[in-house]
Structures are given as C-alpha cells and as structure tokens.
C-alpha cells in the first residue's frame, strides 16, 4: 500500500515525519495519516513527494495498475513487486547518504519549477 511505500522512502532517506511534513508544508499528523493509510494524499502532494525522492509518481504508488494489467489473474506478481521495491531502494540510498543540509538542498532543488537560474549560478 501507499503508506508502506511512503514510510520506507522516508526512513531510507533518514527523515523524520516532522522533517518531511515541514518540507511538504503540511502538519505532521496529516503526513502520519498518509503513512498509516488513513487518508490519501492529493495528486499534487503525490507529485511533490515523488520529486523529493527523485522517483516518478508511478513508482511512488507502486505501479500497481500496470502490474495488474500484465498479470492474468489480476493479482500482483511478487517478482514484479520485489523488482519495484529494489529499484526504489536503490534510488533513495543516494539521498540517505547525504548530511541533513545536503538533503535539504537536494529536496529544495527537486521541488523547483525553474532550475535554469540555479544552473547558471554554477556555471
């Protein structure tokens, strides 16, 4: 479920619920409800979360719809789930290796709509 994926991404990035909620601009309790599957984030929030972790929304939601289409029995294929989980883990390991300041910098960069001014700064 989405909550499990969110929790795994957050923990692998070594972020607290409060840190991620602050970055997202929401209350910690709201984010906690997402992880507990008590409520679902709006589409705009899913996009923001995916950007933070450097993944697609499709990867964030577990690509379940596509997996169901490929599986004749309409149940999720365990091999596909393991492969998707491995891919997610590989992508977020890089973020977890950074210091807190570096994480914040990367996250803020990923959330920028127009990255051209930042790129010019480093040229």
Image (tube, rainbow, N blue to C red):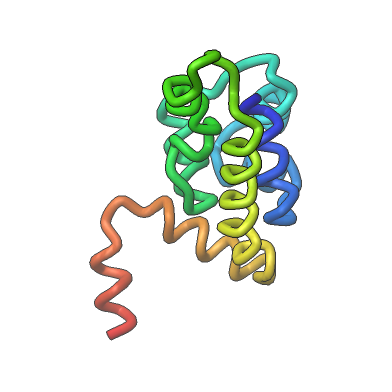
55 shown above or below 47: below
Q: Quadrant of residue 36?
A: top right
Specify the farthest residue to the bottom.
123
The quadrant of the picture occupied by the N terminus is top right
69 shown above or below 115: above
21 shown above or below 75: below
Question: What residue appears at the point 27 percent right and 85 percent down from the top-left corner?
Answer: 123
> How far across and down, in percent of the image, does residue 75 sit?
59, 17
**Nearer the observer, 64 or 121:** 64
76 shown above or below 119: above
**Nearer the observer, 29 or 33:** 33
**Nearer the observer, 37 or 114:** 37
> How far across and down, in percent of the image, does residue 41 sit?
54, 24
**Nearer the observer, 20 or 2:** 2
* Left or right: where 82 falls relative to 113: right
Specify the farthest residue to the front.
72
Question: What residue appears at the point 75 percent right and 48 percent down from the top-left corner?
Answer: 11
* Left or right: where 113 falls relative to 60: left
Question: What residue appears at the point 68 percent right and 55 percent down from the top-left corner?
Answer: 13
Question: What residue appears at the point 61 percent right and 63 percent down from the top-left corner?
Answer: 95
> How far across and down, in percent of the image, does residue 103 sit?
60, 63
């Amino acid at each position: 479920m989405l909550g499990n994926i969110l929790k795994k991404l957050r923990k692998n990035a070594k972020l607290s619920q409060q840190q991620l909620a602050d970055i997202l601009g929401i209350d910690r309790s709201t984010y906690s409800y997402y992880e507990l599957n008590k409520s679902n984030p709006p589409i705009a929030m899913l996009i923001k979360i995916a950007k933070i972790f450097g993944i697609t929304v499709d990867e964030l939601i577990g690509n379940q719809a596509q997996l169901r289409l490929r599986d004749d029995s309409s149940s999720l294929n365990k091999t596909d789930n393991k492969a998707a989980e491995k891919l997610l883990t590989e992508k977020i390991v890089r973020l977890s290796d950074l210091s807190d300041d570096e994480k914040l910098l990367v996250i803020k960069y990923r959330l920028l709509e127009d990255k051209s001014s930042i790129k010019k700064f480093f040229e």
